[in-house]
Amino acid sequence: MGNTNYMKNIPVLNGKTAIVTGTGGIGYQVAYALAGKGAAVILAGRNAAKGGEAVDKIKADFAEADVRFELLDLADSGSIEAFSGKMLSALPALDILMDIAGVMMPDALQATTDGVEMQFGVNYLGHFALTARLFPLLEKGTDPRVVTISSLANRPFVFDLADATAAHGYHASRSYALSKLACLMFALELEQRSRENGWGVSAFGAHPGLAKTQLFNRSHGFIMTLLQVIFFVLPFIRQSASNAARPALFAATSPGAKPGGFYGPWFLGVMGPPRLALVPGRARSKKKREALWALSEKLTGVTFP
Ligand SMILES: NC(=O)c1ccc[n+]([C@@H]2O[C@H](COP(=O)([O-])OP(=O)(O)OC[C@H]3O[C@@H](n4cnc5c(N)ncnc54)[C@H](OP(=O)(O)O)[C@@H]3O)[C@@H](O)[C@H]2O)c1
């Protein structure tokens, strides 16, 4: 049995259906907790072998768990469309959507199938398209919630939406920060639009602080090397992936979570139980959020109701 301490404040979720992106790291821990608490969970990822292993591990600890893997590559708009189509046919409703999967600072400029810079494309834009396509199911859910994962690194040095396609040159760390700022702006804007239009879907932002996952091991560049040295010398400044999943799980399941809230770890935003986190000014800017939303609709060709 894996660590289940981090699940202790999660209510029983029998009858709920959840989709979680990301078969490893925080995505895995979120799926484990939701399935362990009784939700029917679809774990979505780009690697069927890893997805199968994740499902087996969850079922090994929770024999009754209703959890299965489905293929979803967030860097491929065709895959997002196919996955969503399958879900629209298979599910009567969706109660929880966890937009978690992500990449950070790959060793060179990479692009999605639509020519969008990979970090912006996978971390943010793929989830924008996924959420929009699954929206008819969310509208039929019970207390439906969408949680989008941002980061402490959500303050790009320059706010330039041209970074979405690396139109002014490629800056790996700036693109990552833009993607994570965009995730938070999306959560806030979705919540506001839902409230104003009576869509009945609540949106939340969350971030894990600093977590021991594969994210940093797969990242490159000077900043990452420096961080690896810091993590080696001070291993305790990162929390386990399971503890890092708590803000997202709180947002997705707690009756006390505030729609439109941005949740992160309590201690310096790095570790500890969930609490409301600071929202950068740029994410509060309605004008910037509207510009991001319009760009997202243009780049994905997908719209909300
Ligand atoms: N770890 C931290 O300290 C930290 C801090 C702030 C924010 N975050 C955020 O937390 C989220 C989860 O990261 P993590 O720490 O759990 O990292 P991780 O261990 O590297 O897991 C990332 C997951 O995303 C999946 N993924 C990557 N590209 C994908 C694609 N194109 N389509 C579908 N799935 C894809 C990966 O699948 P594969 O295994 O198949 O590659 C993996 O399951 C990310 O959004 C990250 O930005 C993490």
Image (spheres, grey):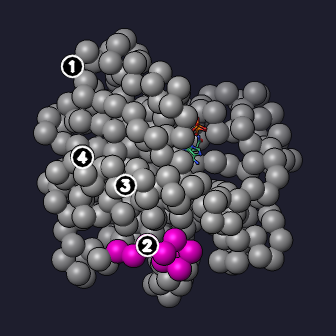
Q: Looking at the figure, which quarter contains the C terminus? A: bottom left
Q: Is residue 287 magenta?
A: no
Q: Are marks 1 and 4 in contact (CB under 8 Å)?
A: no
Q: Which residue is mark 4?
A: 90
Q: Which residue is mark 3?
A: 84
Three-letter code for the amino acid on which mark 3 is drawn:
Ser
Three-letter code for the amino acid on which mark 4 is drawn:
Ala
Of badges 1 and 3, nearer the viewer stands: 3
Whole-angstrom CA distance, mark 4 to mark 3, is: 10 Å
x, y percent for residue 298: 53, 80
The one nearer the camera, 1 or 199, is 199
Q: Which residues are magenta?
A: 296-304
Instruction: Decide: few, some or many residues near mark 3? Use Cα within 10 Å; few <14, some 14-19, many ≥20.
Output: many
Q: Is residue 302 magenta?
A: yes
Instruction: Decide: few, some or many residues near mark 4? Use Cα within 10 Å; few <14, some 14-19, many ≥20.
Output: few
First in sequence, mark 4 or 3: give its number: 3
x, y percent for residue 278: 48, 62
Q: Is residue 161 left or right of residue 188?
A: right
First in sequence, mark 1 or 4: give its number: 1
Whole-angstrom CA distance, mark 1 to mark 4, is: 20 Å
Q: Which residue is mark 2?
A: 302
